Amino acid sequence: MNDSWRIPSVVGNYESLRIAVSGTLQHALEARRVLVLPKGKMHVAGLPIYPASKMRILVPLYVANRLVGLLNLETAKPQRFNASVYRLMKRLWPLVAVALDNALQHERLAQQNQALDASLKQLEGLKNDMIHLVSQDLKQPLTKLRLYLSILRREVERQLTDKQRDYFNTMAEALSSIEHLIKNLDRLIICSEQIELTNWQAASQQ
């Protein structure tokens, strides 16, 4: 076994800590039993202690075969930890372990959701940038095509046959379809930005 274990969480006024595990504490964790430390023997490397404490009880919190935390109880009046209190708390420890495990899983899911949201926002931004580039790249040549088509038609209008006029009309309709597509792309960018703004406003009000 390593000289130290990573305790995922510590119930009490402490955040997640790296606690040196050896000797009695190591055996307590391995045997999944409660460790009672009287005054003079309460020191555990890496785990703070309240100065007025005269007794410390460390409870390994397991869910199935996973160590999810270490419950640290301290008191300045050791007589408070009598047999009846111990029996009551022994019933509560498994519930504390499950509650702590659920909280840790909820926190992990929240972190994963935040990472997923960030990735989705990045992809949304890339999509909008791509649409914007495509829209801009199409607008300029499309404008020139429509202009030159109009000039050409005016110059040869009197010489055109009905079939040739149909060709010009077909080209004009094709240009109109592309212009309509570009307008839809622009609307898509605007809608996406509006949705992003609405979500940001909703998040800031929470």
Image: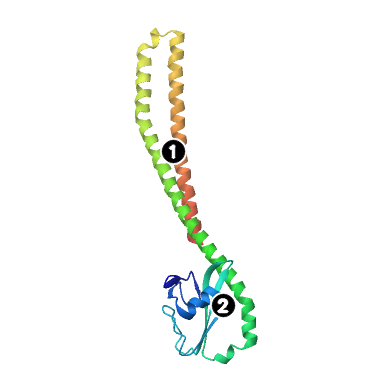
For label 1, count other residues whose C-alpha is less than 10 Å away and answer few (under 14), some (14-19) or many (20+).
some
Q: Quick one: 49 or 125, which is closer to the camera?
A: 49
Element under label 2? loop
Q: Is residue 99 left or right of residue 17?
A: right
**Mark before the other along the chain sequence, 1 or 2:** 2
Q: Position of residue 53 (x, y in %)?
A: 48, 88
Q: For the residue marked with disc 2, what is the amino acid? A: Arg
Q: Are marks 1 and 2 in contact (CB under 8 Å)?
A: no
The residue at 52%/72% (across/down) is 69
For label 2, the residue is 33
The residue depicted at 51 percent of the width and 57 percent of the height is 202
**Compared with residue 2, is residue 141 higher up or lower down, i.e. above or below?**
above
Residue type pointed to by label 1: Asp
Q: Residues within 10 Å of mark 2 (few under 14, many from 20)?
A: some
Position of residue 69 relative to residue 39, above or below, is: above
Residue 138 place in picture, x, y as percent: 38, 31
Rendered image coloring scheme: rainbow
Q: Which residue is mark 1?
A: 186
Secondary structure beneath label 1: helix
Estimate the spatial distance between the alpha carbons at disc 1 and disc 2, rounded to whole Å.
66 Å
Q: Nearer the viewer, residue 112 or 183?
A: 112
User: Eyeballing the image, is 198 above or below 132?
Assistant: below
Please name which of the two marks, 1 or 2, marks the residue nearer to the observer. 2
Position of residue 1 measured from the top left corner of the image (x, y, whole percent)? 45, 70
In the image, what residue occupies the spot 44% across and 12% down? 165
Nearer to me, 99 or 119: 99
How many labels were placed on the picture? 2
Q: Position of residue 173 (x, y in %)?
A: 46, 22
Residue that appears at 37% across and 37% down: 133
